[in-house]
Image (cartoon, rainbow, N blue to C red):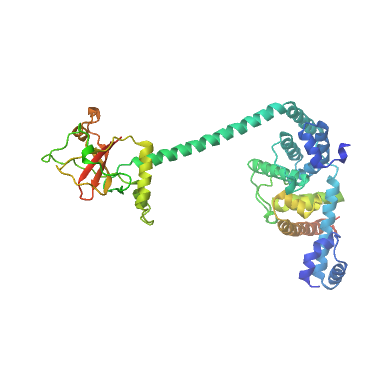
């Protein structure tokens, strides 16, 4: 029965102390939040922490969700995004300084979670997907988040804008630039692979 | 369609988004003519497919059960103390409300004290002249109290100390004189109301410098500061512990420039 209720109704019941409503809301939304954090950070432990923090915010009643400003889902992604950026800031101090290669110059220094791709080993489809994942992770954070929300989570521009707290036009322009960067990166990888491993078609 | 137009719809085209069918046909036709745009479309399609595959791969991933356990425990803790939390929240709100009220009261009190201090600031050279034709008639010579000794002619007249500044005049001076001075009756009313509210005054007593006084038709009340010893000359007690502290007085001066009466102000 609870599964038919909207997020807002579940939230209201949850705030009244209904445990079942809380669990229904959690089961409905935790996967998306977890995957968002995982795609943004590339780290499962960070994704777990972020998911926990997002719902703890909800349980503690510290959030300022306003249905008039956007959907509940967008609100949760916004909280998750803030938590991810907090972790970026925190972990940045723990990340060893490494020399950046020329083709990694666009990546922000705080991307300590990013593992560099190994194009030479990309021989199977699964590894190719992993390369795409690494290319996404190598994007600057403000480009990465729009790709994660719009392309991987298939969120509308309006919802993404609500989650990120920016204008729809900003989402569009960032997405355009992010996709161009991704094509550049993957094309560069493809050239290397084609030359060194004899793979003619990098993409899936 | 040119390359610029093609670039605006390439993302929708690569992801098979809903779009105008005619525009789609024109774009596809353009790829047949422009190798660069065709390559770009191929790249975009490959990227879209790669992202779609990545999304599908991760689709089953979710937070481990331990997260749910932790959250459920937190929720139960929270639900177990709703009343306490509510009371705490209300208490916090009450504290903040009182804090704001106290801050406002302190501000008001500070403003009032500053205003009072500004009013009591003794002047050095300014002189307030208040026309007092209607409200302060000159005392008749016959009503002079017999207990008050008149000052002999050969004695020096009481030295009139510098007059206190009027707050209105001072305020005007501090504003750089940009505003015009308010009409005298405003000053008078202001001082009168202030005096009635905060000052203790004696009655006017006559000052007989001459044997014959002509009736005074009009005059001025001048606020002065005098040596405390002047009190004794009018038969008033003098606090010797404050003998060096001047006293305030209002002197009624006729149009002829002679002082006709005086009252002391505390």
Q: Quadrant of the N terminus of chain A?
A: top right
* Residue A135 visible somewhere in the drawing: no
Along the viewing direction, whichever of B67 and A73 lies nearer the viewer: A73
Q: Residue at x 73, y 52 (%)?
A: A161
Along the viewing direction, whichever of B161 and A135 lies nearer the viewer: B161
Position of residue B64 measured from the top left corner of the image (x, y, whole percent): 81, 35
Q: Residue furthest right?
A: A1
* Residue B10 visible somewhere in the drawing: yes
Describe residue B102's horizontal placement relative to residue A12 as left or right: left
Residue B177: quadrant of the picture: bottom left
Along the viewing direction, whichever of B89 and A198 lies nearer the viewer: B89
- The mark total stands at 0
Describe residue B140's horizontal placement relative to residue B34 as left or right: left
Position of residue B205 measured from the top left corner of the image (x, y, whole percent): 24, 37
Position of residue B238 measured from the top left corner of the image (x, y, whole percent): 23, 29
Q: Residue furthest left?
A: B154
Along the viewing direction, whichever of A105 and B95 lies nearer the viewer: B95
Q: Residue furthest front?
A: B142
Residue A19: quadrant of the picture: top right
Please tell me whether residue B241 is drawn above or below residue A106 in the rendered image.
Answer: above
Q: Quadrant of the C terminus of chain A?
A: bottom right
Residue B241: quadrant of the picture: top left
Position of residue A69 measured from the top left corner of the image (x, y, whole percent): 72, 48
Describe residue A25's horizontal placement relative to residue B104 as left or right: right
């Amino acid at each position: 029965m609870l599964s038919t209720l909207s997020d807002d109704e579940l939230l209201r019941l949850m705030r009244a102390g209904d445990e079942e409503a809380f669990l229904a809301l959690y089961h409905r939304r935790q996967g998306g939040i977890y995957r968002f954090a995982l795609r943004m950070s590339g780290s499962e432990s960070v994704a777990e922490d972020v998911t926990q923090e997002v719902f703890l915010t909800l349980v503690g009643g510290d959030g300022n969700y306003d249905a008039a400003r956007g959907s509940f889902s967008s609100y949760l992604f916004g909280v998750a995004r803030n938590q991810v950026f907090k972790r970026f800031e925190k972990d940045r101090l723990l990340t060893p300084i490494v020399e950046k290669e020329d083709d990694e110059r666009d990546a922000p220094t705080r991307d300590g979670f990013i593992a560099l791709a190994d194009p030479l080993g990309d021989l199977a489809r699964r590894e190719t997907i992993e390369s795409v994942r690494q290319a996404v992770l190598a994007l600057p954070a403000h480009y990465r988040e729009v790709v994660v929300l719009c392309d991987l989570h298939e969120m509308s521009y309006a919802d993404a804008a609500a989650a990120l707290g920016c204008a729809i036009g900003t989402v569009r322009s960032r997405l355009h630039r992010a996709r161009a960067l991704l094509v550049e990166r993957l094309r560069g990888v493809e050239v290397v692979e084609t030359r060194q491993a004899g793979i003619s078609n990098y993409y899936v | 369609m040119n390359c610029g137009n093609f670039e605006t719809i390439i993302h929708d085209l690569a992801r098979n988004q809903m779009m105008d069918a005619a525009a789609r046909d024109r774009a596809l036709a353009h790829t047949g003519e422009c190798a660069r745009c065709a390559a770009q479309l191929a790249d975009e399609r490959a990227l879209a497919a790669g992202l779609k595959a990545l999304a599908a791969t991760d689709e089953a991933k979710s937070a481990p059960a331990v997260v749910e356990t932790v959250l459920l425990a937190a929720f139960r803790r929270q639900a177990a103390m709703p009343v306490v939390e509510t009371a705490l929240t209300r208490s916090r709100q009450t504290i903040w409300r009182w804090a704001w009220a106290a801050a406002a009261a302190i501000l008001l009190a500070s403003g009032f004290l500053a205003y009072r201090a500004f009013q009591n600031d003794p002047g050095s050279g300014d002189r307030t002249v208040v026309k007092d034709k209607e409200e302060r008639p000159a005392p008749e010579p016959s009503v002079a109290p017999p207990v008050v000794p008149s000052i002999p002619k050969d004695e020096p007249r009481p030295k009139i100390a510098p007059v206190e500044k009027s707050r209105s005049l001072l305020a005007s001076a501090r504003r750089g004189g940009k505003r015009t001075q308010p009409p005298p009756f405003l000053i008078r009313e202001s001082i009168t109301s202030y005096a009635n509210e905060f000052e203790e005054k004696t009655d006017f007593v006559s000052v007989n410098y001459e044997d014959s006084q002509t009736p005074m038709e009009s005059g001025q009340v001048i606020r002065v500061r005098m040596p405390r010893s002047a009190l004794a000359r009018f038969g008033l007690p003098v606090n010797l512990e404050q003998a060096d502290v001047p006293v305030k007085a209002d002197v009624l001066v006729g149009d002829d420039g002679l002082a006709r009466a005086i009252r002391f102000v505390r």
